Amino acid sequence: MAKTWMKLSRVTSEALALQPVGHPHRFMSINNLAERLSTRFDHQGNDQDLDNAIVLHSEALALHPIDHPDRFMSFNNLARIIYNRFQYRGNDRDLDEATSLQREALRLCPAVELLREALALRPVGHPDRSGPLNNLGGFLSTRFDRRSNDQDLDYAIVLHNEALALRPVGHPDCSGSLNNLGGVLSTRFKRRRNDQDLDYAIVLHRETLALRPVGHPDRSRSLCRVADCLVTRFEHRGNAQDLNESLEKYRYALTLLKPGNPSQSHVHVSIARVYLLVHQSGLDGIGEDIDTLNAAIRHLKASINIISGGLRFRLRASLLWVLLVDRHTHVTQLEAYATSMQLLDAYMSATASVSSRHHAMKDFPHTLAVDAASCALRRGDVYRAVELLEQGRTLIWTQMARFRTPLDSLQEHGDHPQALMKKFRDLCSLLDKPPVNVLEGMQRVDVEAETTRYRRLVEDWNTTVGNVRKVEGFGRFLLPPLFSDLQDAASDGPIIALVASRFSCDAIIIPHKQPPASIQLPTNLENLGKLVNALRKTVEKQTGPKETQPVLIKALRELWDDVVSPVVENLGRFARPGSRIWWCPTFVFNFLPLHAAGEYKRGGKSLSQLYVSSYTLSLTTLIRARRSHDISLSASFAAIGQNQPPGYLHPLEAVEPELELVQSLLPSSPTISFTKVTSVESTRLRVLRMLQGHHWLHFACHGTQSFEEPFRSAFLMRDEPLSLLGITQMDLSRHEFAFLSACETAVGDPKTPDEVVHLAAGLQFAGVKSVIGTSWKVKDATVQRLVDAFYKRFCGGGTMDSGRAARALHQAVQSLASDTDMPLDHRIVFVHIGV
């Protein structure tokens, strides 16, 4: 069969070559080749065929101008293939576009009764009417699955009923319409629990199966449809006969699929679900496996190992495996977590833009890494807990960092490794560029070509990385780091990783040379969530300088008792009082001011009395920052201000005085090369140039945190924002320090907390070694006093060392502790990130 497809595709390609652009019959050859590629994808799962088919259908649409009699056919074909890609990769944009294209196909097809305006104008009985009706019903059904709009579901059933009426028994597409109507009725049953919908769906699917005898290419699919509905009916009524028949049909369907067929993945998962139902129900005599739980896991692992099934489906199967082993405390728990995180990372790498990656993260459990770490801790494996925590967090930043990985040492191993190094660099350079903006006037064929180009680059990059790993000494190149490597992050002081999972909340103290220590904290996820909400509501209130802020103090005391104090009690073995420590928080811990925890009573303890706190986004980030950190005898410093960006009626009066203050406190020339960019001068492009040419930075401006689109978080400049996305596209690997005197520069996105997407994080991942940011909104008066106190300590001795920033900030805050005019939430708003 594979040879037949190859021959057909080759013949069709040759025909297309004989019909260049402008040839009157080029459309037919394009369409035929696209259909061959689409069919081959259905049976072999090679997504290159899928992308190429879309490119061809896009070109075919471009060949049919408005009012062309076959234009609706091109809309229909393109919509169908984009919909197939949505099912394979799960990109909502594909679903929306497929629906839009199919609506246009319906508009162009005469006599479509669903278009009320055309009802009286167009004749009934057009031969092409059933196809668009059927396809639109399918798109609306899938969109219902994503968005739960009942109107989409009901409308889909109407469309499929009308399509079936136009395809009676004997019509070549009758079985397809029977199948589709059965599918949407089954979906509506799950929504409304109407028994008639489910029973009728089973009848329709049995009729479909009867029309697809042995040898029919869709017989396996029909067997699965019947089995799916039988499983649903078992769950509804508990009839073991339904479950037994479903297992028989799934197994039979699997025997009809050739090795490599992507549908194997789906059938294995379906069989796993049946075995799980058998296990949960305590039924005997169903299936051949006595150990049904292990049988379910075996089929899930088989599904995950079928490459042609696609990353999205394999990832979903792995997450089902995680859910199963967690529920039953199975021996494969850690294996399931590690597999899921590996597949999630691969799935993310195939997405072109960082914003798209962030949206993709929302579709998957955001507690995966912390639950994996908690699992390892419950098994007593602290080393593995740290490794899993690092593997499953900050995936977006990790992906970007890979494209900037130096590989100079490879050239010492001979000509072939040197050629690999060059290829790796070239591919990284291409992948690190921002993707083409597909929303700004590009033709669809160009958009698809660009998308395909990116995916091919990723595949080539993955192959090259695999070849690098074959070179002696590079076996773990860009693989998740081992604990022995991660421990280097603690070379200047211990790191405390805080794990917030639904299973338990723990702290892991990671020293440089000693074994790590884990501490189960006397709190849980629910209480931590309440604490975060209490703190957020408190700092959002407009408090006066004389207020005691009892709610904030109560929250900081609770933070001390439940989180920080148990850590401090164990820190004495790893760090002496007054030394530095680094917090690496996860999940809800990301939104808690750990550095400010204390008893807040006369003679009471507080963390700031005992240690100098910094934060790190990940252990790998801190290691990378330390590698190139050096004390500078001279420095190029830029102070950038913007007091009234567009849309703000009232200027920030303290911006220009703050720039003057910073200049006055820095060491004098020639030690420091100082540039001041005033509000009048601070356009986006000017500031970008300052970032490129100056390795020490101070921002005084408005900062915004976008929760819907975190990479649009920005410093607001005179003409347009300097976005987080723009910053991440820069190489700041030689930059030492940045002080972000702006609001909310170290606030992450609650929907993807472990991705740590904010302005301070962006600067550090771009290469800045040491960053000071803010956890919430900040007042001008607070900034003025803290900046003054900070730089006096930071610039002592006439030199600047970015490694001294944390202690300088700590001392500055301590010096303001007795200032009765400054509320507590103002004093603790600034945090230090990095070396």
Image (cartoon, rainbow, N blue to C red):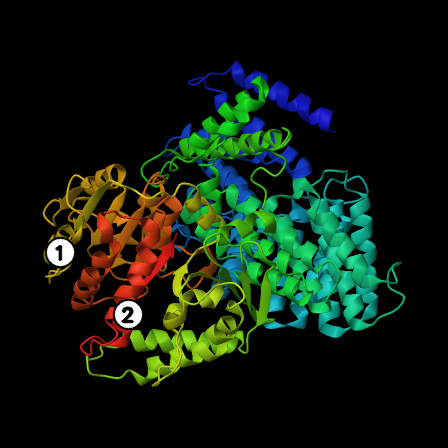
Secondary structure of residue under mark 1: helix
Q: Earlier in the sequence, mark 2 or mark 1?
A: 1
Q: Which residue is mark 2?
A: 814
Residue 630: x percent and y percent?
36, 42
The answer to whether one can see residue 111 in this image is no
Judging depth in this view, the residue of 428 and 593 nearest the camera is 593
Residue 695 against residue 523 in the figure, above or below: above
Please report the residue visible at 55 percent of the width from the left and 50 percent of the height from the top: 486
Please report the residue visible at 72 percent of the width from the left and 43 percent of the height from the top: 218
In the image, what residue type sits under mark 1?
A: Leu
Judging depth in this view, the residue of 674 and 82 nearest the camera is 674
Q: Quadrant of residue 726?
A: top left
Tell me, for residue 661, which label it has, or none. Answer: 1
Q: Quadrant of residue 740?
A: bottom left
Please indicate whether residue 578 sits to the left or right of residue 18 in the image. Answer: left
Which dot, 2 or 1, sits closer to the camera? 2
Residue 72: x percent and y percent?
46, 38
Please indicate whether residue 626 sits to the left or right of residue 738 in the image. Answer: right
